[in-house]
Amino acid sequence: MFKVMIVDDNMTNLIMAKKALEDLYEIIPVSSGKIALEFLQEMPEPPDVVLLDVDMPEINGFYVISQMKNVEKLANIPVVFLTAQEDLTTEIEGYSLGAIDYIRKPFTATLLRKRIDIHVRAVQEQKHNEKVIDQLHKGLSEKIHNIVELEYAIVEMFTSLMGNRSYIISEHCIRVERYMSVFLDALISTHQFKLEETDAEILRFASRIHDIGKICLADRYLADMGDLSIQEKEFNHAHTVLGSEAIKRVIDVVSDNRFLKYAYNMCRYHHERWDGKGYPDKLMTTNIPLEARILSIVNSYDNFRTTNDGSDPLTHTEAINRIRFWSGTHYDPELVDEFINIEKHINGIRFDVR
């Protein structure tokens, strides 16, 4: 049952209003504005409508409604004024303070019921709409949560598969994800690149599967690159296409998914070069997606620090110097500058040793 608070210092009017409405609503009769404010503050569930007299001693109706508007749980309660005054100024002031209606005294029981019925139905409809919207938000949140869970599951699945084929590649991808996390945070803080935190979160874990195409390569190609011939190294380049094409087959089924888009771009283009001499598509400069340009730097850094590129590992300083030297040829110069700015943070990252 909907609740209606009636506030009036005139006992006759208070009783009349109560009798007119009590068959339809739960009535809360109050004899002063001061008591009304105390009740409203203390009530665990405020009334659905307040029927409020304007002319009351000490605290009038205008003061009551102005105080209600300052309290979050009371601000949206519909207030209907009761008044014997007929001047337009009083009515305008009431509406400007947030009243939804005026009822003149003396009133008839029938008129009072009809007017309150209208406002209670509006409250009922609003509550229904809020419930529907809440259910829609809940359903949407659950759907988004399920999608994110699926994306994480995909990453974990491919990470596990890569680990079963080659722990070297698996560990490389895990390290790259850590480097990406630090680099992305730095890039977002500069506000120079079109990166949002929500995008960065997806990029962090999507970067872990940038080498999934290597699952399709023979064991020999997963070993030390230094043992491969030039022809074999060229064949190894196919991992960018093999991985990205596998992701594309999923994209063709699932429409407009940022995770898959970023994963595809990083998988296919992380070996492209700023000067257009990379692979597989020989893209150059900003034609290379931003996420792939970012990944290219951290991917190379990890390769330099390990044996993944077929040569002896470099020190941190040597790796940074090589990246600096290849700025403008292999890498986006602006990104290189930002990476060098955080090189101490990169060097400070530690990994568990197996």
Image (spheres, rainbow, N blue to C red):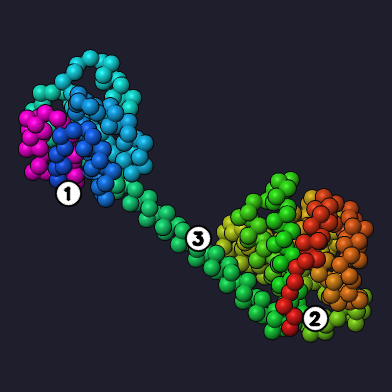
Q: Which residue is at a point 54% across and 68% down the rendered structure image?
A: 149
Disc 3 marks which residue? 144
Residue 100 x, y percent position in the rendering: 27, 30
* Residue 14, numbered circle: none
**Relative to the observer, which residue lies in front, 15 or 232?**
15
Disc 1 marks which residue? 1
How many C-alpha atoms fall within 10 Å of the one at disc 1: few (<14), some, or many (≥20)?
few
Indicate whether 293 appears above or below 316. Answer: above
Q: Nearer the viewer, mark 1 or mark 2?
A: 1
Q: Which residue is at a point 50% across and 63% down the rendered structure image?
A: 145
From this viewpoint, which residue is outermost toward the front? 58
Residue 162 x, y percent position in the rendering: 70, 79
Q: Separation of disc 1 and disc 2 at Cα? A: 72 Å
Q: Residue 318 is drawn in which quadrant?
A: bottom right
The residue tagged with tag 2: helix, strand or loop? helix
Q: Separation of disc 1 and disc 3 at Cα? A: 36 Å
Q: Separation of disc 2 and disc 3 at Cα? A: 36 Å
Disc 2 marks which residue? 222
The residue tagged with tag 3: helix, strand or loop? helix
Give the amino acid at mark 2.
Leu
Residue 73 x, y percent position in the rendering: 33, 44
Indicate whether 242 appears above or below 114. Answer: below
Span shown in magenta: 1-25
Q: Which residue is at a point 30% across and 21% down the rendered structure image?
A: 93
**Relative to the observer, which residue lies in front, 91 or 207?**
91
